[in-house]
Amino acid sequence: MTGPALSDAHGSSGARLIDGKGFAARLTQDIATEVSAFYDRHRITPGLAVVLVGNDPASEVYVRNKALQTHRAGMRSFMHMLPATTSQEELLGLIARLNVDPEIHGILVQLPLPGGLDPVAVTNAIVPEKDVDGLGVVNAGRLALGLPGIVPCTPLGCLLLLRHYVGDMRGQHALVIGASNLVGRPMAQLLLQEGCTVTVAHIDTRDTAALARQADIVVVATGVRELVRGDWIRPGATVIDVGISRVSLPGGRTRLVGDVKFDEVAPHAGLITPVPGGVGPMTIACLLRNTLDAARTIVEGRAP
Ligand SMILES: Nc1nc2c(c(=O)[nH]1)N[C@@H](CN(C=O)c1ccc(C(=O)N[C@@H](CCC(=O)O)C(=O)O)cc1)CN2
């Protein structure tokens, strides 16, 4: 429940910054310790296969970071970089091989996929026990029923931050803006399980601002940059910004912005995640968590 109050430079009257970067670094260290203990017990190093199709520049950065962090946590990383011309059959063939590879405990196909490839069919081709993105129907169904399973990395990261900084969320009103399979839908399920009253808004929901003004917790995952404005936020509310957009600045430089107009929102919020350094780093830390848990399930035969 710590975190610095924002300085006047941010135009804030005292919202605390949620330090996702620091939290993710500690989580990764803990996972490295657990990976080492797992190796001592079984003489097995968990292995993560990451599949990237095409050359989306942001995805290339994310998969490189995934490989780096996987090594840092003491696990094995297997990268499969495929051309954008890869057919659905070729991709499904690779997944079928990874599904039965004993060195692989987690499989992730980086999203978005190039046009012509069906992300639902592809993610559902991964066997549920290696589906470390938690996006297949088995893990998504388990989450919807409140059963143990693999939870998608970004919503899991948001949940860990909320549990740490907010604590008990029972009775709080949570608004999730954006209903994607990757973030919004699983996030809503997790908040329900925490005892929140949950509203889910679409990008084009009428008067999302009015819904936000009633919320104690606002999680935004729309990809619409700076959608959430200062007057949307009830004083003291917790704001979790999942969006990451790169905007061009004069002189060829770029900067990252989220789905929240930070300088306007921070003075109203009680707690807020920055972009960068908020939810993003938690996504990769939770992928490592899910990979180790998947290895445990496969090797020790126990549920995560
Ligand atoms: N199969 C998946 N595809 C995608 C996922 C996912 O969880 N599974 N999530 C996103 C992208 N993503 C991981 O893949 C991701 C996004 C952001 C970050 C991150 O650390 N962001 C940093 C800034 C990094 C930068 O400088 O660009 C931050 O916010 O501080 C990590 C992973 C879509 N695809």
Image (cartoon, rainbow, N blue to C red):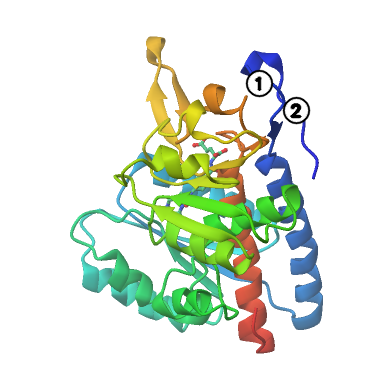
Quadrant of the drawing holding the N terminus: top right
| In the foreground, 141 or 175 | 175
Taking the view exactly as shown, the residue that stands out farthest to the top is 251
User: Compared with residue 64, is residue 100 higher up or lower down, i.e. above or below?
Assistant: below
Give me the residue at 61% from left, 50% from top: 282
Give me the residue at 77% from left, 54% from top: 29
Say what amino acid the circle numbered 2 marks.
Ala
Could you tell which of marks 2 and 1 lies nearer the N-terminus? 2
Instruction: Give the distance between the C-alpha atoms of the residues marked 2 and 1, in whole angstroms.
Output: 8 Å
Does residue 29 appear to the left or right of 301 in the view shown? right
| In the foreground, 302 or 268 | 268
Label 1, on which residue? Answer: 12
Label 2, on which residue? Answer: 5
Q: Quadrant of residue 151?
A: bottom right
Say what amino acid the circle numbered 1 marks.
Ser
| In the foreground, 30 or 74 | 30
Quadrant of the drawing holding the C terminus: bottom right
Taking the view exactly as shown, the residue that stands out farthest to the left is 116
Q: Secondary structure at mark 2?
A: loop
Judge the density around disc 1: few (<14), some (14-19), many (≥20) Cα neighbours within 10 Å: some
| In the foreground, 130 or 150 | 150
Give me the residue at 59% from left, 33% from top: 274
Is residue 65 visible in the rendered image? The answer is yes
Q: Are marks 2 and 1 in contact (CB under 8 Å)?
A: yes
Is the CB atom of the residue marked by disc 1 within 8 angstroms of ligand 1's nearest atom? no
Counting from the top left corner in percent of width and height, residue 287 is at 58, 60
Counting from the top left corner in percent of width and height, residue 289 is at 65, 64
Q: Secondary structure at mark 1?
A: loop
Does residue 293 appear to the left or right of 51 in the view shown? right
